[in-house]
Image: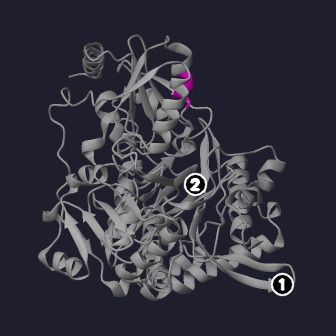
Amino acid sequence: MTYQDKLMAIRAEMLKNGIDAYIIPSSDSHMSEYVPDYYRCIYFASGFTGSAGTLVITANFAGLWADFRYFEQANQQLEGSGYELVKLKIQHTPEYIDWLCSRLPLNSTVAFDYQLMSMALGAEIKTSLGARQIQIKDADLLLNIWQSRPPLPTDQAYLLPEKDCGQTFESKIMNLRIEMQKNRAEVHVISSLDDLAWLFNIRGKDVSFNPVVLCYAMVSLKEVTLYIQKEKLTDKDTILLTKRHITIKAYEQIAADVSQLKNCSILLDGKRTCYQFINLLSPSLQIIQEINPAVFLKSIKNEVEIENTRLAMIQDGIALTRFFKWLEENIGINRITEISASEKIKSFREGGKSFAGLSFATIAGYGPHAALPHYCPDEERDSELKPEGLFLLDSGGHYFYGTTDVTRTVPLGITTDEEKRDYTLVLSAMILGSAAKFPQGTRGYQIDGIVRQQMWQKGINYGHGTGHGVGYYLNVHEGPQNIGPSNAAIAVDLGMITSIEPGIYRPGKHGVRIENLVLTVAHQNTFFGSFLQFETLTLAYIDTSIVISELLTAEQISWLNTYNAMVYEKLKAELSEDERLWLAKKCKPI
């Protein structure tokens, strides 16, 4: 079937079921960012491969609502599919709701799969459409169309050694129950896969780039039930869980058990629980909608997690050093493309210790492609790297003791004055964030303003956030903290690992981004309170060959020189003599 054939089939299902508009979100039943192939509904229906977007289909229009990261990609991938790109004005906003309200007549019916929509968003859709007397309906219209739908993954899961976690899952459950009691909740149903992976010290391969396992959990003040395909667990892990009073039930049993809950208070995370569950709950339940407490507990890394992450950074830094040395020595001599460069950095990571997989799809953009913040090369757009201009590499790895995410932009030869200026401004912004000192309780949007200030003075800005939380051998995008313009009421607190990644993007010309991961640590206590600062964790040299020193302050130059010196000192022991000499030159102070 072509994508137009599939669109016609969906519309036929809509007509048969009395549906005027159908919504297909990009999530799974766990509200994940990355999803198993079974849930790649948008890709099946339209051919769009981005990780975020929403399809809306009516009798005479079909559109993909996506943000600026995917504008060029979506335009290319949707060509001839019957779908049009609808550009979001504000990232992560369901602007299609207002579109539906303005175009559908009264008493229309809008449908979506309740398992694939969050409670919070489902409720917003119901309320907004209900005000226009538009009904909503639960429907999976792909069920009869997707004949060769991939099955749910069956890869085996495994429990991490507790010595590598710094905390037993019994201790984590105890802390979770303390937070439940603070919220006056007797039962907590957890759907979010990274929170479950953290809570039970369990990892798997069910989702690309995220080492998580498809499962649910129901935690009461006395009992814990883990819902998982039993064949995923080894006998040894099953025995250990059972001995520690974890009841194991079939993955599919969660819906029936949720519907059987009566006369108690239940805690649900509205943004990370599917809308189906709210429709299964008994009226006798007191529903408490709050952020899953595990989100906050998980974000504060313990000493074992922090020390292990530092070890992961060494392995990652060695791989990056070898990659950039290889790139410099081969550019203009041997043919290198964006795809072959992506494969090469992966091979260097695979050659290191305890590598467990990529933490996200590598972004390798040369020249104009680097101006697309989430660009991933494919066979149709694979550019050859030339000994001129800028190359942007945003990549990361999972190690069995940590997760990395790092971006470097490097010159491949002659660069323009504009490229040098943009590179230096981005470097300046990254240093401003990395060197910030701030009072405890400071939120991400406040730090975001610090990072952007020098760019703003020159009338320059970038459309994505400045930073996101990062998990411990878990999701590379982890909450609750972020550094960005939105006024999120979450402090960037002690023990959190967060990225700092400003950028400048000039469509059709070039893009620059520089990214490090930082750990929030104590700075000092004064009469005015406790102050925090960042410890930079990433160990990858920052190229200084095109830096315009006059655009940096003396303090920023000192920070840069100190950082590069640290990179060399921490990596040199595991490098060959040739590699050490090469890195020493790259880390020479300016």
Amino acid, disc 2: Gly
400 relative to 97, above or below:
below
**Residue lying at the far right of the rendered structure:** 527
| Picture colour scheme | one colour
The quadrant in which residue 378 appears is: top left
Q: Looking at the picture, tell me which residue is in the foreground, 445 or 313.
A: 445
**x, y percent for residue 172:** 41, 77
For the point 44% across and 33% down, the residue is 54
For the point 53% across and 60% down, the residue is 479
| Foreground disc of the pair 2, 1 | 1
Q: Looking at the picture, tell me which residue is in the foreground, 67 or 368.
A: 67
Residue 66 visible to an observer of this rendering: no
Q: Which residue is mark 1?
A: 526
**x, y percent for residue 163:** 35, 88
Spatial CA span between label 2 and label 1:
48 Å
Q: Classify 10 Å Cα crowding around label 2: few (below 14), some (14-19), many (20 and above).
A: few
For the point 69% across and 56% down, the residue is 426
For the point 49% across and 56% down, the residue is 393
546 relative to 8, above or below:
below
365 relative to 96, above or below:
below
The quadrant in which residue 411 appears is: bottom right
The majority secondary structure of the magenta stretch comes to: helix
Checking the image for residue 442, the label placed there is none
User: Relative to residue 225, is residue 315 drawn left or right?
Assistant: right
Where, quadrant-wise, is the C terminus in this rendering?
Answer: bottom right
**x, y percent for residue 318:** 44, 76
Checking the image for residue 413, the label placed there is 2
Residue 18 visible to an observer of this rendering: yes
The magenta stretch spans which residues?
Answer: 95-99
Amino acid, disc 1: Thr
